[in-house]
Amino acid sequence: MSLRDGARRIRADVVTLVRAVRDPHTPRTAKALAVLIVLYVASPFDLVPDWHAVIGLADDLVVVVAGLAGLHRLIPPEQLADHRARVEAGRPPLPRGRARPLAGAVMWLVALTALAWWGFGWIAGA
């Protein structure tokens, strides 16, 4: 398998999971886990700070991989197979709506808040 094929497969799996989480028949625990994964990745707080060279970034990877494995266990296999077949059939992965701009705005707000927090702490400490 080439690197490009691997990237396509990962993208297809992520799109499949996103479609499955947006499905109204998906269990609430799976939806809650997906929200927690996104919040952990988007939050400025980590289990191990990112300025620790390898370990700081590896904890993010471990949390995301463990969360995705948990999603695979929580979503019923037949539902996951149905969404995978729809993605492979080439149907549009995500409907366009208000969620994408809202998510972008929230991420910018979190980033600016973290920057302001750091900046005020640096000024107060100087």
Image: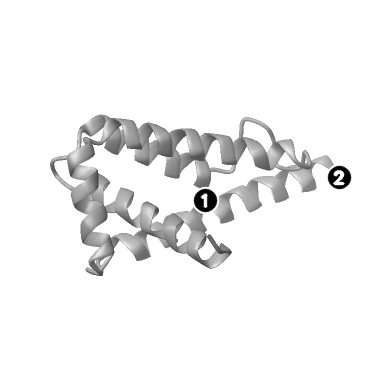
Sequence order check, earlier mark of 2 and 1: 1
Badge 2: residue crowd in 10 Å (few <14, some 14–19, many ≥20):
few
In this rendering, would 18 be left or right of 68? left
Judge left or right: residue 58 versus residue 22.
Answer: right
Residue 76 in the image: x percent, y percent? 21, 35
Which quarter of the figure has residue 105? bottom left
Task: Name the spot of residue 118 as percent of width and height, x first.
Answer: 70, 46
Residue designated by label 2 = 126
SS category of the residue bearing label 2: loop
Q: How many marks?
A: 2
Q: Quadrant of residue 91?
A: bottom left
Chosen colour scheme = one colour
Q: Residue at x 34, y 37 (%)?
A: 72
Whole-percent x and y of residue 106?
A: 43, 55
- Of residues 113 and 78, the one drawn nearer to the viewer in this rendering: 78
Q: Amino acid at mark 1?
A: Val
Mark 1 Cα-neighbour bin, 10 Å: few <14, some 14–19, many ≥20: some
Residue 38, x across and y down, in percent: 43, 44
Q: Which residue is mark 1?
A: 110
Identity of the residue drawn at 23% across and 37% down:
77
How far apart are the alpha carbons under marks 2 and 1?
24 Å
**Vertical placement of residue 66 versus 2, above or below:** above
**Residue kind at label 2, given as amino acid type:** Ala
- Say which of 1 and 97 sits in front: 1
Which quadrant is home to the C terminus? top right
Q: Circle 1 — which element?
A: helix
Q: Is 108 on the left-hand or right-hand side of 31?
A: right
